[in-house]
Amino acid sequence: MQPSARLALCGVLLAFVAGCGGGSPEPQDDAEAKAHGRDTDKTVFDDMIQTQDKARAVEDVTMASKAATDAAIDRAEGDSKDEQR
């Protein structure tokens, strides 16, 4: 291998190692972690976790609406059965 190629390769490797060697992330305080809905530090998966949390909240609202609708249907069926007798 020629000396200039070795020098270029060493430069690229050095730049790669320096780029990967970032400092440790700053730890989150408890208030900020609880604002995210958990007690852990912020991660790369926060967007997916927030999406799942929103889906769970929508599911809770939907299930409450379903329960109210089911109760209304049961009341309506109960009233109509009494009228038919």
Image: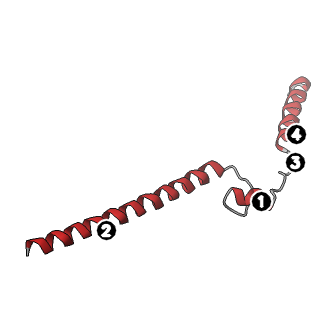
Query: Going by the image, does 41 lie left or right of 77?
Result: right
Q: CA distance from mark 3 to mark 4?
A: 11 Å
Q: CA distance from mark 1 to mark 4?
A: 33 Å
The amino acid on which the numbered mark 4 sits, given as a three-letter code, is Ala
Dot 1 or dot 2: first in sequence order is: 1
- Find disc 3 in the rendering and name its residue: 23
- Compared to residue 6, the image places residue 34 above or below, namely below
The amino acid on which the numbered mark 1 sits, given as a three-letter code, is Ala
- Find disc 2 in the rendering and name its residue: 71
- Find disc 1 in the rendering and name its residue: 31
Q: Quadrant of residue 32?
A: bottom right
Q: Nearer the viewer, residue 79 or 63?
A: 79
Give residue 22's position: percent from left, percent from top.
85, 45
Give residue 41's position: percent from left, percent from top.
75, 57
Q: Secondary structure at mark 3?
A: loop
Q: CA distance from mark 1 to mark 3?
A: 23 Å
Residue name at image x 60 percent, y 54 percent = 49
The amino acid on which the numbered mark 2 sits, given as a three-letter code, is Ala
Q: CA distance from mark 2 to mark 4?
A: 64 Å
